[in-house]
Image (cartoon, rainbow, N blue to C red):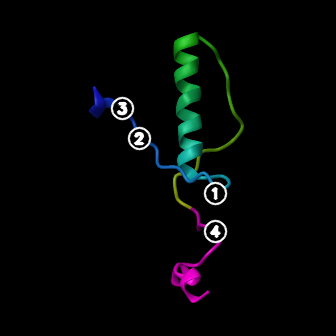
Amino acid sequence: PLNAMPVYGTIASQFNDLGTNTLFARLLELINETANKKWQTSLPVADDVEKQNVIIPPERRYYLREI
């Protein structure tokens, strides 16, 4: 059922994104359970969100209107 499907919020343009890292860790767990593997990663999964690096600051989001 749809309500049992996990949702991971990810930001493709952000390196080391919390959502992508969490998704990767969960996929690794599922592969290990399903395929009887013992794959591991040395990458830690952070519990908190780090400061996001943005290309265009929020106050400049409409900068194209000025051109």
* Mark nearer the N terminus (1 vs 3): 3
Q: Are marks 1 and 4 in contact (CB under 8 Å)?
A: yes
Q: Secondary structure at mark 1?
A: loop
For label 4, the residue is 53
Q: Residues within 10 Å of mark 3 (few under 14, many from 20)?
A: few
Q: Residues within 10 Å of mark 1 (few under 14, many from 20)?
A: few
**Which residues are drawn in magenta?**
50-67
* Disc sitting over residue 14 in the figure: 1
User: Which part of the image, by quadrant, shows the C terminus?
Assistant: bottom right
What type is the residue that disc 4 sits on?
Asn
What type is the residue that disc 3 sits on?
Met
Q: Nearer the viewer, residue 63 or 35?
A: 63
* Mark nearer the N terminus (1 vs 4): 1
For label 2, the residue is 7
Q: Residues within 10 Å of mark 4 (few under 14, many from 20)?
A: few
What type is the residue that disc 2 sits on?
Val
The residue at 63%/56% (across/down) is 13
